[in-house]
């Protein structure tokens, strides 16, 4: 092995200065958000056209105007597989529902705090998060809810503290109903509460399912994604039987779809074959716009309002609203 002095063609290099005692976390790795792209004015498919699911697009009623807000439908955005688009879908579905006049609360229920980051909040700088509401009787949920850059969309943030709650709750009475108790004081103020779950089927996710009216399952169009869904559906059924009889699967959302690859199309066909009607007609294509919006700290509906991604999440919001009417 060559020593550091011998790399770069034998040129002598001074090793980078080391700072003993400076924790790695203090290194600033943030990216500067760049300007929003020139908007694309993406094509929107019409009813009856064959969509990416291979089915003709079903009729979806236009969302009805809201005359009175609340009580909220609670939707858990859930899949124990990591990186399938849960957080991205929570932010962008929430923002699209708000555009349709709904009052929306987004709940960051993942100690990673990615939902908070995606809305431009630095969660490790927060004094109080959902963790304090859960664990400290003196902290009310309204003390912690924050505005976001989107009108009528609010955030209940989280950070790494929440990982301790999972352990501390184990010995609590009624531990699976902690989230529903936490949300009760604000349920009448919102039309939708979207809970961004962490990638596990642990106690926090069970709390989200126990609180929810519906589960929205983002499913990456990739072979291995199909494997875990049976276990997820099994967990949903157990929660319905034992904790929350009203729980429904609102829909399965295919994400990261690449229409150019046979693999994506095959996985899509398999998902529709296995789950049928519950699969949304709306499919979210794979595009670099989504990682870009995370850096920008904004939903795609604001950052690139006419892009295909923004239009897809609006179409999803219309489907979600139509399904809600059918359930109520
Ligand atoms: N449709 C998409 N196309 C391309 N990239 C996407 C898309 N949706 C999400 N991403 C990116 O993929 C990564 C994972 O997405 P996201 O954080 O929404 O998934 P997640 O299911 O919440 O992950 P985790 O399980 O870690 O919470 C992010 O970098 C996000 O920007
Ligand atoms: Mg996430």
Image (spheres, helix red, strand yellow):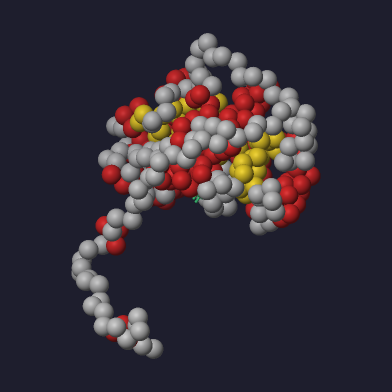
Q: Position of residue 170 (x, y in %)?
A: 45, 48
Residue projecting furthest to the front: 38
Nearest the viewer among 124 and 203 is: 124
Nearest the viewer among 139 and 318 is: 318
Horizontal side of 269 relative to 109 (left or right) equals: right
Is residue 298 among the parts visible in the rendering? yes
Q: Is residue 72 above or below residue 285?
A: above
Q: How many marks?
A: 0
Q: Position of residue 255 (x, y in %)?
A: 62, 45
Horizontal side of 282 relative to 120 (left or right) equals: right
Nearest the viewer among 11 and 160 is: 11
Q: Can you say which quadrant of the picture contains the N terminus?
A: bottom left
Q: Residue at x 22, y 63 (%)?
A: 22
Q: Position of residue 288 (x, y in %)?
A: 52, 48
Q: Residue at x 65, y 23 (%)?
A: 322
Is residue 173 among the parts visible in the rendering? no
Q: Residue at x 42, y 28 (%)?
A: 150
Q: Quadrant of residue 130?
A: top left
Q: Is residue 313 above or below residue 254?
A: above
Q: Position of residue 136 (x, y in %)?
A: 32, 37
Q: Quadrant of residue 157?
A: top left
Horizontal side of 84 relative to 272 (left or right) equals: left
Residue projecting furthest to the bottom: 1
Q: Can you say which quadrant of the picture contains the C terminus?
A: top right
Q: Residue at x 65, y 43 (%)?
A: 254
Nearest the viewer among 82 and 240 is: 82
């Amino acid at each position: 092995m060559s020593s550091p002095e011998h790399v770069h063609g034998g040129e002598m290099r001074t090793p980078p200065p080391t700072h003993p005692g400076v924790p790695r976390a203090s290194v600033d790795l943030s990216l500067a958000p760049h300007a929003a792209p020139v908007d694309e004015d993406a094509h929107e498919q019409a009813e009856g056209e064959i969509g990416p699911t291979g089915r003709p697009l079903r009729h979806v009623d236009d969302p009805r105007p809201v005359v009175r807000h609340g009580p909220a439908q609670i939707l858990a955005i859930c899949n124990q597989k990591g990186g399938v688009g849960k957080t991205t879908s929570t932010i962008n579905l929430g923002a699209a529902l708000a555009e349709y006049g709904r009052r929306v609360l987004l709940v960051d229920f993942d100690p990673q705090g990615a939902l908070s980051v995606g809305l431009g909040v630095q969660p490790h700088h927060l004094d109080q998060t959902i963790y304090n509401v859960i664990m400290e009787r003196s902290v009310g949920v309204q003390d912690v809810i924050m505005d976001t850059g989107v009108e009528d969309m609010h955030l209940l943030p989280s950070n790494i503290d929440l990982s301790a709650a999972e352990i501390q709750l184990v010995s609590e009475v009624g531990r699976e109903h902690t989230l529903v108790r936490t949300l009760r004081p604000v349920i009448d103020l919102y039309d939708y509460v979207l809970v961004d779950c962490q990638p596990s089927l642990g106690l926090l996710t069970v709390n989200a399912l126990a609180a929810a009216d519906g589960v929205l399952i983002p499913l990456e169009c990739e072979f291995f994604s199909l494997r875990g869904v049976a276990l997820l559906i099994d967990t949903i059924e157990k929660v319905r039987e034992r904790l929350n009889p009203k729980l429904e699967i609102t829909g399965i959302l295919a994400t990261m779809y690449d229409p150019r690859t046979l693999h994506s199309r095959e996985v899509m066909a398999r998902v529709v074959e296995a789950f049928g009607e519950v699969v949304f007609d709306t499919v979210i294509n794979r595009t670099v716009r989504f990682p870009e919006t995370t850096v920008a700290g904004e939903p795609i509906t604001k950052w690139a309002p006419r892009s295909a991604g923004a239009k897809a999440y609006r179409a999803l919001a219309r489907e979600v609203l139509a399904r809600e009417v059918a359930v109520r």
